[in-house]
Amino acid sequence: MRRVFALGENPVTTVLAMASIGSGRLCARVQEKLCQWGQYTRREAYSCVRTKIGSQTAPRVPQERQNEKHSQSLAATAASTVSAGCWHPCSRPEIAGTARSFSTMRTQQPGSLPEYQIDPYHLLEDDLKDVYIYIRDALRRGTYQDDLYEIATYYFDGHGKAIRPMVAILMARAINYHIYKEKSGLLSSQREVAMISEMIHTASLVHDDVIDQSDFRRGKPSVNVMWNHKKVTMAGDFILAVASIMIARLRNNDVTLVLSQVVTDLVQGEFMQLGSKETENERFAHYLTKTYRKTASLIANSVKSVTMLAGADEQLADVSYQYGRNLGLAFQLVDDLLDFVSSSAAMGKPTAADLKLGLATAPVLFACEKYPELNPMIMRRFQEPGDVERAFDLVHKSRGLEQTQYLAKQHCQEAVRLANLLEESPYQKGLIVAADYVLNRMK
Amino acid sequence: MSFSKLSSVIVRRKCLPAITVAGVNFGNRKTFGTSNTLCTKLAQEKKPDWNRAVSEAEKIVGYPTSFLSLRWLLSDEIANVALHLRKLVGSNHPLLKTAKSLLYNGKNNMQAWGLIVLLISKAAGHSADIPELEQDKAAGVLHSQRALAEVTEMIRTSHLVHKGLVNLQAPLADASGDMMFGNKIALLSGDYLLSNSCAELANLRNQELVELMSSAVRDLAEAEFVGPRDKQNNPLPARPRSDIVEYKQFTDKTLEPLVVSEALGNARAEWTLRHVLNAGSLLGKSCQGTLKLAGHPLELQEQGYLFGKHLALAWQACLDREPFLPNVSGSFSLVSAPVMFTLQHDPTLYEEIEKGQESVDDVDYEVVRKAVLTGPGLEFTKKLQKEHSTAALEVLNQLPASDARTALANIIAAMQDL
C-alpha cells in the first residue's frame, strides 16, 4: 500500500483517496472481510423498545413519543446505515448518505468534543471495584484448594485495565437507560456477564502465557514463571469451568450460546496464529479474522449478551454487537501498534513481543507494501538472527504505524456512530469516551 | 476421538480408510464407525472378554459416538494439529504418548466412556413427551444424548491432553524448541476440545446440564492439585495418617467442590477423592446429565450419577491392579489403590515414596512392588473394586431388563474377571 492514508483532510476527499488507493488488492480483501462482518442492515426507522423487565414497567406514552423523536433524528443516519455498516477506509462512498454520515462522524470523532468529560472508570467506580471481588469470591467458592485458588486469582489483582467488564457494564447501563429510562439499574445478570468476560479473557491469558513462555505481564512475573506449567494450565481450565458454571446459572439459552461462541473463537484465533498465509491479501484477511476471533469476539459478544439480558430486540442487540466488534478490533490494532512504540515500563510487558513470537501484525503487514523484503521474513516468522531488529526498523521507516492507527480510528469512529444510536445518557457518553480511550491509550 | 484419529494418521496410515469406509447411516445422522475399535482389537487380542463385551455393546447403541464423524476429519484445526504433530515425531514430547495411548490403551479407551453414557441412556429409556424428531430410533437414544456422549469424550480427552504437558518452568527446565512446541500444540488441542464441548453443550439448550458438565470440568482441573506432587506434577500419596476418616460424598450437592484436606493421608478416602475428581465426577455427571435429557425424575438422575461414579471407580481399581499381575513389570502410579493401602498398612514405606519429591522416577519401584505384593494392598483393592462394581450393578438392577442393561453388566463382569 504505497498510497498514504490522508489524515486530517476533508473527509470526503479522504474517503475518495482511500478508495483510489492503487494497490487495492489488499484493500479489496479487507473491505470484503469487513462487509462480511458488518452485515447488519437497518432499513426501517430505529425502534427497539420493550416496556417490561420483570415487574418494572416504563411509562409508555412518553416513551413512544420520545422514540418518535428519536427515530426522526436517526432517520438520516439509519438511511445510510446499509452501506455505512460496511463502511471501510477502502470502500468507495457510492451514495451521498455515506458521505454525510461520515461527515457526521467527523464531528463526533473521539476526543474532538470537549463536553465529553466523562471518565468511564470514574463513572463505574463502584461497579468495577466489585467485579474483581466477586470474581475472586466465585473462584473461592469453586475450590477448597489454596494453591489452585492462588494461581487462578493471580491476574485478578485489580491491576488490569478491566476494559472488558468496563465496556460490558457501560453498555448494560446505556441499554437499560435506552429501554427503560430512569427506571433502570444494572441487572445482576448483566454484572455477571461483565465478570464472565473478564474471566474468559484471563483464562486465555493464563494459557497464552504457557504457550508463549512470557516473562512479564501487568508489571509482574507472569503466571508461568511462578508456578508449574501443568498446574497453570489446569488453573486456566478451572477459571473457564467456573465461568461456564456462572453462565449456566444465568439460565438463558441464548446468552449461553453467544458466550460459548466466544470460547470457540478464542481457540480458533489462537490456531490461526500458528499458520501464516502466502500472499499479501490473504495475509491481511487472515490477520483481521484472527484479530476478531482473539479479541473483538469477546467484547462484541459480551456487550451483546448484556443487551439481550436487558430484554432488547435483535436490532438493538446487533447495534451493541457491532459496537463491541469495532471497539474490539480497534483495541487490538492499537495493541499491535503499541507493541512497536511503547516502552516495556508503560506496557508492563516486553515490547516488540509479537515479532519475537514470529507474528506479523498490522504495522508489519502495512509496511511490507513499501518494503517487500519483509515478506520472506514474515514467512520464516522472523526466526533468523537480526530479523526482529530489521523488521522493527522497517516498520518505523514505513507508514505502517500511521496506517494502523488510521484503521483503528475508523473502527472507533464506527463504534461512536453506533453508540450515538442509543438514547443519550452518561453511560452512552461513556461508550463514546471508551472508544476515545481505546484509540489514545498509552498502555 | 480426534487424537486416536491423529495418531492413526501418523502411526497407522492404513487405518484411515477404515474410518471412511465404515461410515454408517443411523437415522438422519451420519455416524462413522471407528478404526479405533479395529486398532484396539489388534493391540488387545490377549483380553478377548473385555473386547467382546465392548464391541457387542457398541452394536447395541449403533457406533458409540459421533466423535469420529466427518466434521472432525474435515475440521481445519484438527488438520492443523495433525500437521504439527507430525513435526513432533522423533521428539520425546509426551503428547505423542498421550495420542498413542488414546488409541491403544484398551481399557482406558475414551470411546468406552461415551459408550457407557449411550448404554445407560438406552437402558433407562426416555420420558414419553420427547418429540419423535429428537430420537435416534435405530440406536434407541436421543440425538441430544449422543451429543452429550461426545461431549464426555471431548472433555476427558482434553483433560488427558492437558495433563500430558511438560512443565517447562524456568530455571529447572530445558526449554528446547520441540518441548515448547509440543506444549503449545497440546495446550491448544486441549483447549480446542474444551471449547467444542462448550459449544456442543450450549446447543443442547439445557442450562442445568451445562452447569452440571461445567462442574465436571472444574473437578478434573481440581484433581491435578490434590496432594503432594513432583516437579512434573505427578501425584505422590500424602503421608499416611493413623486416624481413619470415612470418605463421604454428598450426592445431593454434586455441583459443589469436594473437601480435600480431610481425605489426605487416609488410603481409602484419599484414593476415592482423587479418582472421583479425575474420573468419577465426569462419568457420574454425564450419566446424570443423560437421564436429565431423557426427562427422568430427579431421583433417577441421582442414581445415574451414582452408577457412573461407581463404575468409574471400579474401573480405576481394576486398572490399578493390572501392573501387579504376575509377569507384569515396569512402573505404576504411586497413588494407585494397592500402593496406598500398602502404605496405610506399613507407613515406613513412605520413606521410599518421599524419594520421589523431585521426580517420581527416583522412587525404586521394585521396592514398592515387593511391599505391595507381600502386603494386603491387592486384596483390599480387589475388595474395593467389588464394592464399586456391586454398587453400580445395584443401580442397574433398578432399570428394566434390556440389551443395553445386559451389555453394561457384561462390561462390569469383564472387568471383574481380570
Image (tube, coloured by chain):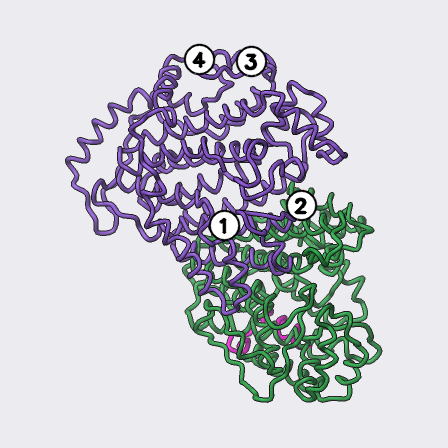
Residue picked out by circle 4:
A9
Is B377 left, or right, of A254 in this rendering? right
The label shown at residue A200 is 1
Chain A's colour is purple
The colour assigned to chain B within the rendered structure: green
Asked whether residue A56 is in view, the answer is: yes
- Circle 2: element type: helix
Q: Split into 4 quadrants, where in the image is the C terminus of chain B?
A: bottom right
- Farthest right residue in view: B327
- The amino acid type, in three-letter code, at marker 1 is Ile
Residue kind at label 2, given as amino acid type: Ile
Labels 4 and 2 within one chain = no
Q: Nearer the viewer, mark 4 or mark 3?
A: 4
Chain of the residue under label 2 = B
SS for tag 3? loop
Question: Residue at the spot x=49%, y=50% of the render?
Answer: A200
Real-space Cα separation, disc 2 to disc 3, in angstroms: 38 Å
Q: Which one is nearer the viewer's eye here, B332 or B325? A: B332
Going from N to C along the chain, the mark reached first, 4 or 1, is 4
Residue linked to disc 2 = B78
